[in-house]
Amino acid sequence: MIKGFVFDLDGVLTDTAEYHYLAWQELGGKMGIAFDRVFNEQLKGISRMDSLERILKYGNKSRAYTEDEKIALANEKNEDYKKLITNISPADLLPGISELLKELKAADIQLALASASKNGPIILKRLGIENLFDTIVDPACLTHGKPDPEIFIKGAEQLGLRPDECVGVEDAEAGIEAINAAGMFSVGVGSKESMKAADLFVTDTSELNVRDILTAAANWSHKEQKGSF
Ligand code: BG6
Ligand code: MG
């Protein structure tokens, strides 16, 4: 039985995935590395430093900077990003998210945040939804980033639940991979192509429906149990 939902933040609760893209593009411009939205899919869900490494590799510049310079570049991106998120307000919740979270709480389902972003807590606060979340996984405590399942396993653990008692919601391919590897029912938000590994997917957050998700997750866990015999 599903007792918890473990949410990604950027691109699921609010459209900050777009701001990450814009801030990386700005930095890419300064480093002489151009990339588009197709490449950007590979950055979703990936930590700040790992994203920088991927961009440098893409631009054949992996060895162009010292470790200290890379830290400075990542800080520069984060400063740009922080400017873009200054004015975030409850109006920036993606369509249907406010209703979804309230419906889940009303159904006594616990909520965890499993975002790779160190800006997660401040964004939840600005969105006015921090009180709806029972726990937030601190990405600084993790050994491995997504697609490793660690962050989702921790999310379930912090709720006092088993992964198979939780649903994970993601917009990143690496995130869906992480949820699946954690042994959780995965819900993807995005295109059919990028969300092909999700147990259930919607193209828009407005289509996320508690009853549909719980029904699909119940069928999934039934299948899982049968499969283990
Ligand atoms: C993830 C985003 O949620 O957080 C990534 O999908 C981002 O794009 C990562 O790089 C880290 O975020 P931050 O805010 O700590 O730089
Ligand atoms: Mg995301």
Image: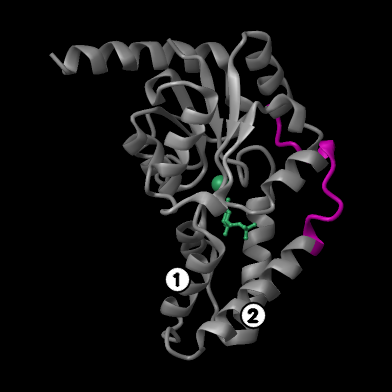
> On the image, numbered disc 1 is attached to which residue?
54
In which quarter of the view is residue 5 placed? top right
For the point 67% across and 15% down, the residue is 105
Q: Are marks 2 and 1 in contact (CB under 8 Å)?
A: no
For the point 29% across and 10% down, the residue is 222
For label 2, the crowd category at 10 Å Cα-Cα, with few meaning under 14, some 14 to 19 and many 20 or more, is: few
> On the image, numbered disc 2 is attached to which residue?
72
Q: Which residues are magenta?
A: 83-96
- The number of discs equals 2
Please provide percent x and percent y for residue 37: 54, 62
Which amino acid type corresponds to the residue marked 2 in the rendered image? Answer: Ala
Quadrant of the displayed image that contains ligand 1? bottom right
**Residue 111 in view:** yes
Magenta highlight: main SS: loop
**Quadrant location of the C terminus?**
top left
In front of the other: 93 or 125: 125
Please provide percent x and percent y for residue 209: 58, 18
Q: Which numbered disc covers residue 195?
A: none
Please provide percent x and percent y for residue 223: 25, 14
Give the SS element for disc 2. helix
